[in-house]
Amino acid sequence: MIRSHLPLNDPTQAFFLTRSIARALSVNLSEVMHHGAFTPGDYAKLINQCRACGRSEQCMAWLAGNGAGAERAPEFCPNGPTLEELAKTIA
């Protein structure tokens, strides 16, 4: 198993940042999982990608300025493409 030399971000913070970015794109991850378009494993992958990102401060700043109704995730977000695709799927 290969380990990154960088520590992972706090899992609770990554959980809330991931949910917040999703909500900004009008994606309710719990609802998407309930309807079968997304699995708990997919969700865990998003959280782990967020934990490894290292840009929590930038993410919080983006969320402060973009709130609900954002059309795109921040460019630096490793989960952006997945969340944007989910947003198109449920639109």
Image: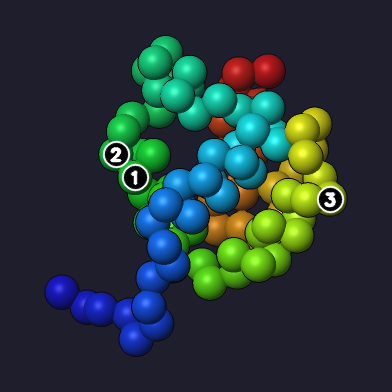
Badge 3: residue crowd in 10 Å (few <14, some 14–19, many ≥20)? few
Q: Nearer the viewer, residue 68 or 70?
A: 68
Q: Residue at x 31, y 33 (%)?
A: 40
Label 2 sits on what residue type? Gly
Q: Dots 3 and 2: beta carbons under 8 Å?
A: no
Residue 45 vertical position relative to residue 49 in the rendered view, above or below:
above
Q: Earlier in the sequence, mark 3 or mark 2?
A: 2
For residue 41, which numbered disc appears in the image? 2
For residue 65, which numbered disc appears in the image? 3
Q: Secondary structure at mark 1?
A: helix
Q: Dots 2 and 1: beta carbons under 8 Å?
A: yes
Relative side of 83 to 69, left or right: left
The x, y position of residue 84, in whole percent, is 64, 38
Residue 46 vertical position relative to residue 90 in the rendered view, above or below:
below
Question: Residue tagged by mark 1?
Answer: 44
Q: Using the numbered discs, state the Cα–Cα distance from disc 1 to disc 3 in whole angstroms.
A: 26 Å
Q: Secondary structure at mark 2?
A: helix
Q: Dots 1 and 3: beta carbons under 8 Å?
A: no
Q: Residue at x 78, y 51 (%)?
A: 64
Relative side of 89 to 26, left or right: left
